[in-house]
Amino acid sequence: MDMYKSQAEQRQNCSNEAMKTAEDRDLNRLKAASVLLTSWYDASHRTLPWRENPTAYSIWISEIMLQQTRIEAVKPYYDRFMKELPHVTALASVEDDRLMKLWEGLGYYNRARNLKKAAQIMVCEYEGDLPPKYKELLKLPGIGSYTAGAIASIAFGEAVPAVDGNVLRVLSRIFASREDISRQQVKKHWEEMLLKILPKTSPSSLNQGIMELGETICLPNGRPACESCPVKKLCLAFRDHLTEELPIKSPPKKRRIEERTVCILEYQDEVGLCKRPDTGLLASLYELPNIENHLTREQIFAEFGLKKEEIVQMEDLPEAKHIFSHVEWRMIGYRIVLGRPLGKRWISAKKEELKTIYPLPNAFSRYTKLIK
């Protein structure tokens, strides 16, 4: 019995030793890559608005805006937002409709709501500043491990990793990893690996260097610019011609399809709007009147309680589609010009006010652009 136990222990020890050797090898590769990436980032990083005189607040706002949104699309929103809400206290006290108007077009509106909630906590508990520690940042609404890591390392110099989709893609290719990057366990593994090699003096340059590489060179969908990559000599995917196959990511769940009918209701220089419920999809935003299913003109008259003699003009509008993370709207539309006031059923908004007051989600942009 002791002999069998001894053999099992030997096998386990050999297995543990092999795992340790593999981890050491990976850490050495990661350390070597980190030196090259830090040097490359310090010498060649792009000039971006939030990198000029960065503060914890500006880094926070930019990182939240950049979730699910391209850098070029974010720039004008960031500039406008920072001019109107330049610090935590201003954000904490802004009216909800004004906040949504500033965010209009960026989508994922819960990001903006969580910004305000977090700002109010900062005013009450942190004297209007962002907390300087990773673990404290994690407690705030809308701040997960990546955002907390980015703020803590860039603004406060704390040696913590910031792992997002760009970082996962870069690391998967450097190590030719076939682990599914959509799994939380895989993200945690890379966070732990980076934590072991992050420099105590300048963690920000490494974190931003990996992000920058993913945004500018190690691009998704099999399109990396490998010849310009500072770590190509260390990249196993480049060596083994696997860059088009990696990273591995499980496909998203199939979206639910919803048909909707959207109406532009006009009376003189006014347009009819509705306000969405305080919870759920596009909560508290304004919208053009719309109804589930594709309806005929007669069905629209019945739904809205309209009489044909009240209608000055009615025309069909182009079809449109909008994709949310879990649902896809397929829309048809009508423009209806009335000969009488819109009435109490709808909010009567001046057409000019659509630009300045009422936050309208991108889902209706195909139709709001048609309002003259």
Image (spheres, helix red, strand yellow):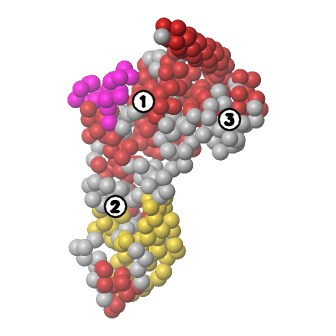
Q: Nearer the viewer, residue 235 or 20?
A: 20
Q: Nearer the viewer, residue 312 or 335?
A: 335
**Structural crowding at the residue carrying mark 1, measured as other residues with C-alpha within 10 Å and reported as few (<14), some (14–19) or many (≥20):** some
Q: Amino acid at mark 1?
A: Ser
Helix, strand or loop under label 1? helix
Give the x, y percent position of residue 229. 71, 29
Earlier sequence position, callout 3 versus callout 2: 3
| Magenta span of residues | 122-141
Res. 27 image quadrant: top right
Residue 245 forms part of the magenta stretch: no
Q: CA distance from mark 1 to mark 3?
A: 24 Å
The residue that label 1 is drawn on is 145
Residue at the extreme bottom: 309
The residue that label 3 is drawn on is 217
Give the x, y percent position of residue 271. 36, 71
- Judge whether 301 appears above or below 152 on screen: below
As drawn, is 343 to the left or to the right of 216? left
- Judge whether 205 appears above or below 183 on screen: above
Instruction: Give the residue at x 26% y 35%.
Output: 120
**Structural crowding at the residue carrying mark 3, measured as other residues with C-alpha within 10 Å and reported as few (<14), some (14–19) or many (≥20):** some
Instruction: Give the residue at x 51% y 34%.
Output: 164
Helix, strand or loop under label 3? loop
- Judge whether 363 appears above or below 196 on screen: below
Judged by its main secondary structure, the magenta piece is: loop
Mark 3 or 2, which is nearer the eye? 3
Q: Amino acid at mark 3?
A: Ile
Residue 366 visible within the image: no
The residue that label 2 is drawn on is 286
Helix, strand or loop under label 2? strand
